[in-house]
Amino acid sequence: MMKELKEILKTLLKEKQGYLTFLTGAGISAESGLPTYRSIDGIWIKGTKYHRPEEFGTYRYFSQNQEEVWQYNLFWKKMIGAAEPNPGHLALTEIEKLLGDRFRLITQNVDGLHQDAGTRKVYEIHGSKHKVRCSKECSGPFEFPENIPSKEYTEDLTPEDINNLKCRKCGSWLRPNTLWFDESYNEKNYHFDTAYDIADHTDILFVIGTSGSTALPVGIVETIKIRAKWIVLINPESDTFFDAIMKGSKTLYSIRESSSVALPQLKNIIEEILK
């Protein structure tokens, strides 16, 4: 498999045209200790045992239960703070250095581990847990206030926490700068148009650690499939939605390895070709 991929990459890198794009999901961060949303030990199940994700992870629920949602998000903040980039993240940073302007990384992840690893061209299509914005949209996204501490899931918010989680302009609750299930993608917060523009100019797409359960990633894959460009699935699981929509495609390759194994190998291949 890697031998065939090497020949494809030789041709693409010689042409010097479109992007080599990487689309990452929760699977790449699972190896840093962050559970995936829909796995058996996923964060929705561990963190919100009384709710289905599609119920709890909505603006509607937040508008009625701000303290509970923030309690959960401050627990998330604690987990993210303890996580570190793994070999998959670090390999992507090295690949970016090798490919230069032909490299693009689109991520569904909200943990910031790609940036922590040193990757620069990162487009966060589901937002970032490291930023907040006014829930009434009177202000755009800004860095998470330093005076708001992380929490265990069982810890209640203090009056000081609640005060610090209010917008300084209008007094409304701040909200995480992440896309909820009852919200739509847009360019301002989630790079919607940019993601499709990248897809239109991509020669090969690597889909890493994502099952294909959200709309924009599926749209990106289908756009590149229509253009008959190469798609490489890197995922130890074999029954994802992406496998189903790519079945029979002559431009598809599947690598049944974890990202921390496959991406360092891919980095070595690109490095060898470019020598």
Image (spheres, rainbow, N blue to C red):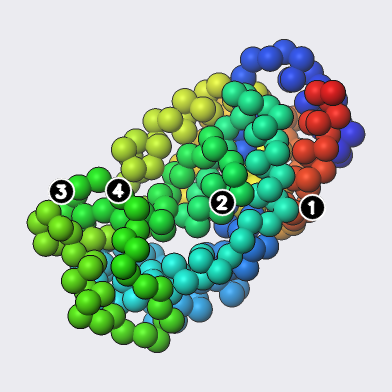
Q: Secondary structure at mark 4?
A: loop
Please name the amino acid that badge 1 sits on. Answer: Val
Q: CA distance from mark 2 to mark 1?
A: 19 Å
- Residue for point 63% across, 56% down: 85
| Crowd band around label 1 with a 10 angstrom C-alpha radius: few (<14), some (14–19), many (20+) | some
Pointers 4 and 2 in contact (C-beta within 8 Å): no
Using the rendered view, name the quadrant where residue 77 is placed. bottom left
Residue 141, disc: 4
Q: CA distance from mark 3 to mark 1?
A: 44 Å
Q: Earlier in the sequence, mark 3 or mark 1?
A: 3
Q: Is residue 143 left or right of residue 110?
A: left
| Crowd band around label 2 with a 10 angstrom C-alpha radius: few (<14), some (14–19), many (20+) | some
Q: Is residue 100 left or right of residue 156?
A: right
- Residue for point 80% across, 23% down: 274
Query: In this figure, which residue is indicated by the disc labeled 1?
Result: 261
Q: Is residue 55 left or right of residue 199?
A: left
Residue 138, disc: 3
Residue 249, disc: none
Q: Secondary structure at mark 3?
A: loop
Q: Secondary structure at mark 2?
A: helix
